[in-house]
Image: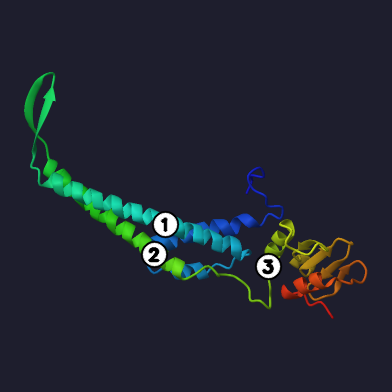
Amino acid sequence: MGNPVRFSDPYGTDGWDKVVGYTIGTVTCLLPLSGGIRDVYTPNDPDDYNGALRTIDNAAVVAGDITAITGTGAIATGVIAGSSGGIVTVTSGGTTAPVSIPVAATGVVVEKVGVALTALGVNITMNASANKSAGYDRGKKSESSGKSINQLRKDVEKGKAPKEIDRFDKGRKEKHEQDHVHLKNGTAINKDGTLKHGKDYDLNKKTLNYLKENGWKIPN
């Protein structure tokens, strides 16, 4: 994202899913019956995408409530102004004089703005609530296919992966590579269980189970 001081993104992959999540989240909170748009995008990292959607929904509920309350207040102000007539008393330099201004007309405008704000606030709150009810599991893989490469990388970065694992790399299509895992002993294993480089491997039980759960076809 061009800001290495604020963001830690060693593989250059995290930002886009969040940006798309915030954008789609905002659109679907503003437009009624648009929640299906959230299923159109397939994220590289479902956690980033779903987290962005959740953040927008939570913010939209609050913003919608505030907008509706503001609109209700504007309606009340407009009604009062509209019924007060068109003459006010102005004092200037010690002189008091009645001045005719379009208070009633202004009140009507304020009232209409209030109605629009209230409708907008209610719309945002309803859309956000519906989106929250739909849940946040878009783009997540089934248990059989396991986590994405980006999620596995995060496991390594956060110390959640087995200690035997050094890193995960995504296979480059132009080189006809598979996704592969690098072990700390220098061995790299393709997702189909074949060696990418190094010697035969003898994985401990924790590492073996972790890889199998995430789609690696490691032979018994």
Residue beneath disc 3: 148
The reply, left or right, for residue 72 in relation to residue 6 is left
Report the disc number at residue 127: 2
Report the disc number at residue 60: 1
Q: Could you tell me the amino acid type at mark 1?
A: Ala
Q: Give the quadrant of the C terminus.
A: bottom right
Front residue of this view, candidates 16 and 216 = 216
Vertical order, 176 against 6 (above or below)? below
Vertical order, 61 against 193 (above or below)? above
Residue 59 place in picture, x, y as percent: 44, 55
Residue at 60% from the left image edge and 71% from the top image edge: 140
Q: Are marks 2 and 1 in contact (CB under 8 Å)?
A: yes
Judge the density around disc 2: few (<14), some (14-19), many (≥20) Cα neighbours within 10 Å.
Answer: many
Q: Could you tell me the amino acid type at mark 3?
A: Ser
Residue 104 place in picture, x, y as percent: 12, 44
Count of numbered circles on the image? 3
Q: Could you tell me the amino acid type at mark 2?
A: Asn
- The answer, for residue 109, to whether it is visible in the render is no
Q: CA distance from mark 2 to mark 1?
A: 9 Å
Q: Nearer the viewer, mark 3 or mark 1?
A: 1
